Structure formats: structure tokens, C-alpha cells
Image (spheres, rainbow, N blue to C red):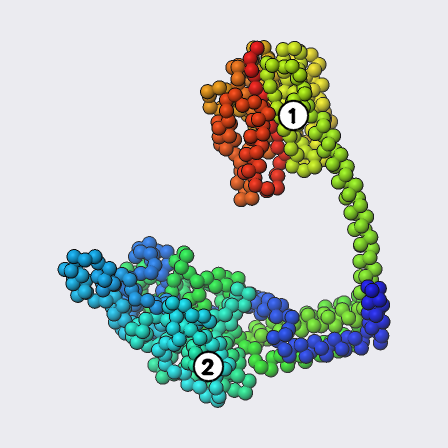
Amino acid sequence: MLMRILAVLRRVFHAGRGRPAAVAMLAGLAVLLQLPEWSPFQLGQLALFDRYQRVFPRERQSAPAVIVEIDEKSLKTHGQWPWPRDRLAALLRAIADLKPAAVGLDIYMPEADGTSPEALAARLPEGQAPLRKALGALPAQDATLADAIRRVPTVLGAAGFDFETLTTARGLRSVPLRVDGGDALPLVRQYPFVLASLPELQAAAAGQALLSVDLEGGVVRRLPLVMAVGDALLPSLAMEMLRVATGSTAVEVNVGLTGIDSVGVADLTVPTQPNGEVWLHFGPALEDRYVSAADLLAGRVPAAAIEGKLVLVGLTGFGLMDTRTTPLKDHVPGIDIQAQVLESFFDGRFLLRPAWMPWLETVLLLAGGLFLIWAVPNVKPRIATLLATVLFVILFGFGFALFRLAGLLLDAASVFAALNIVFGSLLSSVFIEADRQRRLAEAALHREREAAARVAGELAAARRIQLGSLPRAETAFPGETRFEVAAVLEPAREVGGDLYDFFMLDRQRLFFVVGDVSGKGVPASLFMAVAKALGKSVALRGEAGVAEILRCANEELSRENPEMLFVTMLAGILDVQTGDLALCNAGHDAPWRRGPGTAPEQLTGEGGPPLCVLEDFPYPPQHFRLAPGDSLFVVTDGITEAMNGRSELYGTERFAAVLDQAATDERPAALVARIREDVRRFVAGAEASDDLTLLVLRWTGP
């Protein structure tokens, strides 16, 4: 079936040297460009528009707006949010004293103040009549805030909701908008419900505005200047603040043939998209836009910072801030976006995507596509690619130039994607070659899978051989009663670099060793086998002590070590008749000892570097005397550094706790099982990060 499809495609793309198929594709893509809601290129379009702004961010020419932020300093000075309404009233009075042009509140107050005197009086228990009466004589804090709102031209912010909640309403008090040219209501974003402040506060305010913004992929790119709650049109915060500041009677909405043409107030006219939105041209986040509410209440803000300005009041404290992402990848409070809107109005910098822009993009697509259809079949693929590259550079350069010079948003990304499709159809031979390469790749992949299966089988055999080379404690010392030993080794991969060994040097001396080769996998496993064999060979040569055994092993291993691996090792010799224990540590974790009635202790002491790090290093021995019933625990860091899914380490404290909880007469095999099970519970299925090895030696007495 696939071969039939490829044959059909070959005939289609070869017919007329691929031009008929390319023309058909070009026509379909031109129609698609006129239907943005069906366009598959929207993400590319938005990414390009963001790139325009990052290359040419708005340069602030004026500073008409200042943000009074309820920040961390304000919360630390005046208490956590929400503040009592009288404190918010004090903030508004402090702003009013500095004579702003208008104040906009990005704060919703749909419920009465629970800290107001009348609210506190209502919650008093019986028998508190004098206190209730005294509280009742105090002014209500909502009324205090309403009085403060009347002192300064204030616009209250509200939020549109698509669903009803306990605090939403179906409308709010507002100044009607003046609409010219048609009905604007069907064109704008409509909300059936609104979250607004108390009616008492609304009545005191000079205006009401909606602050709602619809995000695109989590980014604010557009902001509506006019919206609707139910059947009532409402302005954005920026437009309403300008109306209040200029003393205008209404915000004006002009409706044209394609939708809303502009929204204006006083002598300002802002061109908009057909739905009343504007594309925002963002500048960088600037600290000088902000004034701390704490500084304002303390009288530390000069009058020049507020006088005649449009003051926005909002929350920026940690955990309270409504963070928004801009095309510049800045994460800013929502109130910062309102300030940038006001700056854009005063700077006269509007981003425009007029109704004729899709037609211009279609013309560019047809012109570029027809050029490719004429040129590509007549030149070599290398030249065709060069021509297409030059065409794309011109296209994107034109888009950046329009943005820089006129603030126009040309969707060069969609045109680019469509031209790429046409270009690809013209290079139909590439598809044929790609199919051939795919079949070759499938054959190569099949061979690789076969090779991987062989390697997996070989690794499984290597694991069996490696683990089979380790001594088995249950059969190593038949009839022995003076000591017991148990051990476990679990590689993190198919094979690993940990090792352990134990055997009798003579009838009275038991030699044991635990090691950890740097790295994991096959190289570590091979070096582990060499280290284990050399260690045993050196130990069985004669009567040398444990320090000499390590020194000789270090010398032998360092001689042939092309991969520059090293081994941490803990070796010991136990006199099974007297309990005398000689230990030698080469960069390994110190062992643990626990005896009957004693807490676990780690046998720390002088040691040396891992084997293969320093040649001819004299490893110092440590000497201990075990009491009957004492157990020695030797581990690799695969236990203490075992990690769970939250990246937490098992650690020595938990290891010591497991030892402490075990019965003093518990046998080594049971102790090994107990510790291994506790590690499994801790790791809880997380992937092993290192090989795990544990050896437990218990001396029962002569």
C-alpha cells in the first residue's frame, strides 16, 4: 500500500515538473490565510509578533502613570493583606494630598470589611452591651473608605466572570459609553457576571472599569479597551482613568464596516482591532514606575512623583501579585501592564493589524509562490534553496521594517510557512530520496536491534558470571561456629563495579574485603574482577598483614590501568579465636560495629586514598577487639547514597537507626535482609543510581 502511495505521489509531483501540484497548494494556502480561525500557523504568528517586540521594545517617551504598590515592605510595616478599609482609606488620602490626576484601584472589595466596628460588635458575646454600644458609635470602615474615594477622582477596577460565584453580580454602576456608527455590543468580549466592589464604594467612585484580559499561551499580547457585562458596555481601566482625569462625559466607541475602528476619550483616539482590542507594544519592566505604599503612608514620597499623574494602586507583595508574562518574557504584576497601556497612549505608540493586513499577506504569498513555481524547476536544488532563502530574508526584513517604522504587525511567519510548503512540493525528488533513506534507515535500525539483543544477552551472561564469582556465605564455611557472615551485591546495571570477598587465610584468620570501582557498567565490572582476583592472590601469598595486602594490591592494579579507574576498598583480617580485628581503609566508607547492649558506632580512623590514586602509599592499619556477639557492617555508598523519587538520600542516620532497631542476637543473613528491605522501601521503585553492596560479619566467640 505504501509503495502505491509513493508511486502516486511520484506521478503527481513529476507531472509538469511539479508546477500543477504547487499551484493547487498555493491556491489552497491563499484561501487558508484569509481564514485565521482555521490557520495552523497561529503559534508561529504569535511567536513572530513577540520577536518583533523583543528586537524593538517600546522606548518610553513619557511617564504619565505611577504605580503605588502594596509590596512586601508595606505588608511588613502595616500588616498582612487584606488591610482594614480605614488603612486603605488612609492610603487614598495620602495620595489625594499629592494631587494626582486620577487614581485607579486594581483591588476588588465585594464584601463588607470584617474588621469594621459594626462587624466586631455583631460578633461580641452576650453581656458586652457597653462595648457593643461603643463600637456602634464608631464610623463604619467601608464608609470611611467611601469618603476617601470621594476626595480624589477614583476608578474602581472590576473583573469579568464567565460563571457565577458567591461574590459576583450581574452588573455594576458605570458611566455609559458613547457609541457611534453601529452596535458595538456583539463585537466585544462579553461577560455574564462581574466581580466588583461594594455598591457603597461604587457610588463614591468617579468611574468603573474592567481589568479582565484573555491570555494567549499564558502571555498578554492584547488588551480590550471596551468590554461588556451583560448588555452594558464598560471601558478598560486605562480609558476610564483618562476620562475621569480629563473630566470627559463618556468614552467614545466608533464602529465601522469591519467592526470597532477606534476607542477615544477627550482628544485621544486609539485605533483598535474589530473587537475593540489593541495590540500592546511593551517596554521593559522599570522600577521607577513603582512607589511603595509604606513610603507614601510615611510621607517619604515627594509630591512631584504623584502630582498630575495617573496613579494605579495594586498588589505586588509575595503571594498576592497577579503575575503576567509579556512578549518580552518579563513576569510583571498585572497593574504594570495598565501602566504600560497609559504610557503607550501618551507616547502615541500603537501596534496595528488593520483589516487589510491579511490581504497584503495573501498578495505576498501569491507573489512569492509564483516566483518559486517559475524559478525552482529551472535551476539546481542548491540554487533553488539559495533563492528561497533570499526570498524569506526579504519577507522577514519587510515585516520587521513595518513594525519598526509604522507599528504594523505583518504575519510573515504564516507566509513563510506557506511558501515553505510550496517550495517543498516543487522539490518532489526530495520526497523520493527521503523514502529511500527511510527504508535504508529501517534496515539499519533492524540490524541495530539485533545487535542490541545480542549485547543484552551477553550482558546477562556477564551478570551471571560476575555474581557467580562471589563467594556464597551459606556454603563457604561449613561447620564453622566461631563466626557468621552474610553478604549481598546488586549492580545498578546489568553488571557493576562493586565487589566483596571472604576466605580463610589459615585455620585462625578470616580475610574479608569490600570494594567499589569508580564508574558503572562493563568497564567497572571488568576492573572489579581484576581487583577481586588480585586482592585474593596477594592475600594468599603468605603471612602479610592487611596493610601490606592493600599496598601490594594497589601496586599491581596501578601497573595496568588504561582507563584510569580507581577502587575504594575496606579490607580486614579477623582472628576468629581471639576477636582481634585489623582493618585497612582505602578511601571507603568506614564500617559500623554493633554489639549486645550497645548502640551502633562507626569505626572511623586513619585511612588512605583509593587504590590506583597514589602508588606506594603505606596504608595504616587500625586494630579493634570484637566482643562475642559483636557484628561488623561494611557497605558501599550504593546504600547510604540511595536516592528516592524526591532526590532524597538514604543517609547514614537512617542506616544507623535500622541497625539500632535490630535484635542484638539477629543473625547476619537476617540483618542483610532487614537492611536491604529498608532501602527498597525508601527508594520506592526509583532507578538505582549506584551498585549496592553489604557485608555483615558476626563474631560469636572462640
Asked where in the image residue 401 lies, by quadrant, the reply is: bottom right
Residue that label 1 marks: 500
Residue that label 2 marks: 263
- Residue at the (58%, 21%) spot, across then down: 697
Q: What amino acid does circle 1 point to?
A: Tyr
Assign the N terminus to one quadrant of the image.
bottom right
184 lies left or right of 560? left
Along the line of sight, the residue nearer the viewer: 297 or 38: 38
Asked where in the image residue 319 lies, by quadrant, the reply is: bottom left
The 10 Å Cα crowd at callout 1, few under 14, some 14 to 19, many 20 or more, is: many
- The image shows residue 231 at horizontal and vertical percentages of 43, 81
- The image shows residue 420 at horizontal and vertical percentages of 72, 70
Along the line of sight, the residue nearer the viewer: 354 or 596: 596
Q: Which residue lies furthest to the bottom in this view?
A: 181
Q: Which mark is residue 171?
A: none
260 lies left or right of 132? right
- The image shows residue 444 at horizontal and vertical percentages of 81, 51
Q: Kindly tell me whether residue 8 is visible in this rendering.
A: yes
Along the line of sight, the residue nearer the viewer: 214 or 429: 214
Asked if 678 appears above or below 411 in the picture, the reply is above
Q: Quote the CA–CA distance across marks 2 and 1.
A: 82 Å
Q: Which residue lies furthest to the left in this view?
A: 130
Earlier-in-chain disc, 2 versus 1 = 2
Assign the C terminus to one quadrant of the image.
top right
- Residue at the (48%, 88%) spot, across then down: 182
53 lies left or right of 110? right
Q: How many marks?
A: 2
- Residue at the (77%, 44%) spot, across then down: 452
